[in-house]
Image: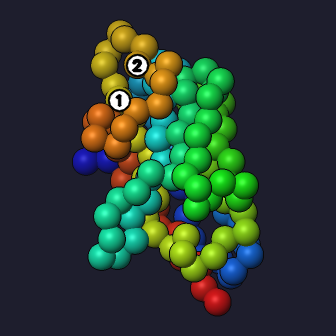
């Protein structure tokens, strides 16, 4: 069951750009850090980026550092992942996730993958040569 609304995936040529969006409906994201993950066919899901609840801290996997930028607009209840200089190795389904505990601010720090319990439906990113 999808717990976020994701958009922005698609097909792009090497070197192209996409911006992914992760939006929540029916609850506020401003208490929660958001993690971005991706999973390629036949591979384990891996962390890509994260952003804390107020946007004060961002982290990136070495494989995307300098190419991807995570940001958030809590007024719009949305988190973004700007993806530039894309390569075929970036081809994967991309997910956003949060640790949600009603009434509790869990987003002061980024979390490990296993700690996240709310997940988006995933959006496909395909980079072709």
Vertical side of 10 occupied by 61: above or below:
above
Mark 1 → mark 2, Cα distance in angstroms: 7 Å
- Farthest residue, direction front: 62
Expressed as whole percent of the image width and height from the top left, the position of residue 28 reads 47, 22
Residue 124 in view here: yes
The residue positioned 48% from the left and 48% from the top of the image is 36
The residue positioned 53% from the left and 39% from the top of the image is 50
The residue positioned 37% from the left and 11% from the top of the image is 104
Q: Residues within 10 Å of mark 2 (few under 14, many from 20)?
A: some
Quadrant hosting residue 127: bottom right
Split into 4 quadrants, where in the image is the C terminus?
A: bottom right
Vertical side of 51 occupied by 6: above or below:
below
Residue 82 in view here: no
Vertical side of 13 occupied by 113: above or below:
above
Color style of the picture = rainbow
| Residue marked by disc 2 | 106
Numbered circle sitting on residue 128: none
- Farthest residue, direction bottom: 129
Element under disc 1: loop
Contact between marks 1 and 2 (CB within 8 A): the answer is yes
Numbered circle sitting on residue 99: 1
Vertical side of 98 occupied by 109: above or below:
above
């Amino acid at each position: 069951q999808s717990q976020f609304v994701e958009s922005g995936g698609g097909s792009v040529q090497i070197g192209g750009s996409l911006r992914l969006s992760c939006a929540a409906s029916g609850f506020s994201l401003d208490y929660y850090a958001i993690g971005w993950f991706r999973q390629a066919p036949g591979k384990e899901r891996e962390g890509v980026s994260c952003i804390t609840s107020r946007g004060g801290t961002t982290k990136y996997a070495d494989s995307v550092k300098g190419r991807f930028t995570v940001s958030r607009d809590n007024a719009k209840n949305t988190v973004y992942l700007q993806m530039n200089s894309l390569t075929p190795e970036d081809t994967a389904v991309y997910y956003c996730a949060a640790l949600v505990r009603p009434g509790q601010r869990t987003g002061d720090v980024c979390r490990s993958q296993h700690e996240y319990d709310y997940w988006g439906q995933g959006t496909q990113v395909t980079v072709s040569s």
